[in-house]
Amino acid sequence: MKGTSRKGLMCWAAAVATVAGMAFAPAVRATGDDGERALRMAIEHAERATPPGRRPIVDTHIHFWQVTRPGGVPWPTPAEGPIFRDILPQHYTAMARANGVVAAGIVEASGIVEDNKWILDLVRHDHFYAFFVGNLEIGAPTFAGDLARFARDPRFVGIRGYLTGPPEGITLSPAQLASLRDLARRGMTLDIISRGTKNPKDQVQALCTAVPDLRIIIDHLGGAKGPPPVDPTWELEVRRLADVCPNLHMKFSSFYDMYAPGDVVFPSPTDLAAYKAHFDVLMTAFGAERLIWGSNWPVIELHGTFEAQIAVAEEYLAPFGKHVRDKVMFRNALAFYRRHGR
């Protein structure tokens, strides 16, 4: 292994030993014996950092914003009511730790390029916030330069794409393919929403087959909508994606969206029966290896509580045993959200 590769791996391994839990600094080549050793270290430190009587959780989907800073934020707006307020680390950390969260990943909610830097600066000295999924417009002329700049920070592990732009969505034009291949070459990840008319699943399938070495995750149950029975078209599309795209994961997150009519105050169910049929589709389609938990806090506060959503996840996973539970709730996140490239 080249010296730079070993240095990157040792940096990552050292970071996971911090008091706060696991920091996902990049392993230049996170494969082979060194990569596996670093991953085992991360798992061991996660288990040691967990409060007594709990199993570890890595929350892979939270948002921060500050509506009171100069210029405000593009989203949320006053229309989103209770979440149109400053949402900062001090509002999340203690609650998350009390519920067994040992590390969290921030997903950028803003499409403004410099807001990526704002987040990185916000948590620069707080290792509890272990990784950051930024927001850059795929195919934009500035994409390569912006990605190279933010990639200098090891916590910047990937981006969420095709949400705030481009307006034409997934076209896989030469410019878009160049951006996607840049991500893949750097060993970074792509989060994507696919629900309703937003990024239809046939387009996601075209993307994941066009760039097969890019690790992709579909957020928030892949657009599942309740109540049961499961929509057969959704199920067919989800199963086809899982079969055709081995590089694709599914985020086991934001359960309440299944019932909520958008980002408005709406009380969603908190009983497992309301969600189980859809969970079963995702578990049998993707398997325990490709499901990754996340909360979507604070947006979920429009529809229910952080604690209740964790309880639904734990109740569903309990019959599968501790090994499967741990994969979904923290181990898969450790493997997925770290840089595998330069």
Image (cartoon, rainbow, N blue to C red):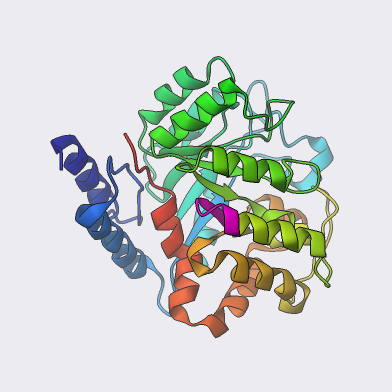
Report the label total.
0
The front one of 178 and 295 is 178
Check the image and report above or below for 331 versus 202: below
Check the image and report above or below for 178 versus 188: above
Say whether residue 249 is magenta.
yes
In the visual, does 159 lie left or right of 259?
left
Residue 151 position in % (x across, y down):
39, 30
Q: Residue at x 30, y 63 (%)?
A: 45
Q: Residue at x 31, y 59 (%)?
A: 42
Locate residue 87: give its quadrant. top right
Pick the quarter of the image with the C terminus. Answer: top left
Residue 74 position in % (x across, y down):
71, 28
Q: Residue furthest top?
A: 141
Check the image and report above or below for 185 versus 145: below
Residue 102 in sight: no
In the visual, does 285 lie left or right of 16?
right
Pick the quarter of the image with the N terminus. Answer: top left
Residue 162 position in % (x across, y down):
66, 34
Residue 335 position in % (x across, y down):
39, 55
The front one of 112 and 40 is 40
Residue 33 in sight: yes
Say whether residue 281 is magenta.
no
Locate residue 304: give its quadrant. bottom right
Q: Residue at x 49, y 48 (%)?
A: 105
In the visual, does 220 lie left or right of 77?
left
The front one of 190 and 285 is 285
Q: Which residues are magenta?
A: 243-250
